[in-house]
Amino acid sequence: MAGEPGEAMAHSAFDTILVLDFGSQYTHLITRRLRELNVFSEMLPCTQKLSELKFKPKGIILSGGPYSVYEEGSPHVDPTIFDLNVPILGICYGMQELAYRLNPENVIAGTHREYGHAMLKARSLDNHVDRLFEGIEESMRVWMSHGDKLAKLPEGFHTVATSDNSEYAAIGHETKPIYGLQFHPEVTHTQNGTALLKNFAVGICGCKQEWTMQKFLEEAIAQIRHTVGEKGQVLAAISGGVDSTVAAKLMKEAIGSRFWAVLVNNGVMRLNECEQVKKDLTEALGINLTVVDASQRFLDGLKGIEDPEKKRKFIGGKFIDIFEEEAIKIEEAAASDPTKAGKIEFFMQGTLYPDVIESLSFKGPSATIKTHHNVGGLPARMANGQGLKLIEPLRSLYKDEVRALGRALGIREELVMRHPFPGPGIAVRILGEVTPEKVEIARQADHIFISEIRKAGIYDQISQAYAAVDPSRAVGVMGDKRVYGYIVVLRAVTTTDFMTAEAYNFPWDFLQRVMNRIVNEVHGVCRVVYDITSKPPGTIELE
Ligand code: GLN
């Protein structure tokens, strides 16, 4: 996998289906489904100039989209797509775009909009253009979501399937491997949708199904060695979460102790977490790790800050300052270590594919709900201030692929399956001002809650869980004495994408057991509540 550092390079090592995004909410599902078939797929915006592609795709899929092809200002694909001589599949807007390209009169507004299920009937299954439907029953349920339709069959095409409402539910070119579907094969509501995508990617485009994390691991190690060179050294900030741990272990496998990881203890980590991360990374995984204890500096600085955004900004900024101080020390140590003998030239970041997709999607950025809590400003500062190049070895991967890669790297299951944890840590789980007393309460309560969840065997059914502290106090009675204590808020959610979420439905006796332990074992707490708010409107973290 040769390429620039920071670029997603899997496309040069694996057969790749390029998905061009016209802004559909389902676009990322197309790449997901293909990868589940062990076919690598990458998404780019529909405006991508095809002559500037850095790889040759085995096939191209045009996604759906919210626009109407015939309207002014609607997005259009680079017309050279037809000269690339690779199979093309248009889905919904993508099919309308193919038809429109051939003749603008081919697409019109339909009289019936069609949202939801439809019954599809495939036709003339003996024709060679119908390889898309090979091995699939003639009649199946599909998911539609469109208002426009083809007015007529584009020249050179024939109808492969129809539905009651769509005369041209699936079309194929008579002689070229070009197909269009009015329905969405990528959503699970479409029966045999994955089989259709497989027929396209494997049967028609000829992609080898080689996208596995074992193979990726070999390729990634070779690529990191190629990028970093014989002597180059790499620096990274790590948190102990899944992404940074997997990325760090990958770097360690590739370049050994020329990879330097730094963990900053910001004083708002969970109970025993700093020690545990240190143990996991150094003892179990052999990573060259420096731990900086800056907890006092963070806690001092947090004094008096109540506003959630100010807390996040303070923690982010202070983190960068401390990391930079440490980076300078490490650079000196690295340069003077004769066994390593190279400059630190790179800064590693555990960016995942959903972040890349977010920045490439064909739509404007959504409004900021919260300042992003990753080490967001750090890469830019390292690049400008220290002249480091960015290296992002997980840039092609979805979260579950990162987990699979972690397993391939021999990282223990409990670590691989960890819930996400916010960068500002417990600070955003303490409403209002952060004080050492409240940090201690949040830590103890959280530890009890998570231990009980693990003991009950339900940790993996929950996407994220924690205990937070509400600083308004409530009256209670303990040992016949009046007490005035904090309220602990328990939150546990299930979600597939963290964009929407539901509160987890705990058995009542479980909640009672947790409440009982918290009020008995955590000093200063006299009430426990369970937050049942869904997202939206509630975010997953409280602040
Ligand atoms: N906006 C187009 C229509 O309504 C395409 C919709 C889609 O791609 N889902 O027909």
Image (cartoon, rainbow, N blue to C red):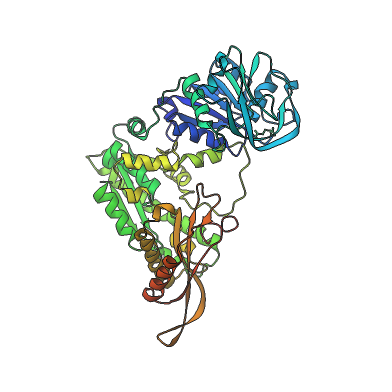
Residue 341 image point, x, y percent: 26, 38
**Which residue appears farthest toward the top when viewing the image?**
175
Position of 537 with respect to 402 (left or right) is right
Ligand 1 is found in which quarter of the picture?
A: top right
Residue 310 image point, x, y percent: 54, 61
* 474 to 90, vertically: above or below: below
Tell me if I can see residue 291 in this picture: yes
Residue 258 image point, x, y percent: 29, 40
**Which residue appears farthest toward the bottom when viewing the image?**
480
Nearest to the observer: residue 236 or residue 321? 236
Residue 293 image point, x, y percent: 34, 60
Q: Quadrant of residue 399?
A: top left
Tell me if I can see residue 270 in this picture: no
Q: Which quadrant of the figure contains the N terminus?
A: top left
Nearest to the observer: residue 377 or residue 459? 459
The residue drawn where x is 54% and y is 62% is 532
The residue drawn where x is 44% and y is 38% is 395
* 322 to 121, vertically: above or below: below
**Which residue appears farthest toward the left when viewing the image?**
339
* 439 to 524, vertically: above or below: above
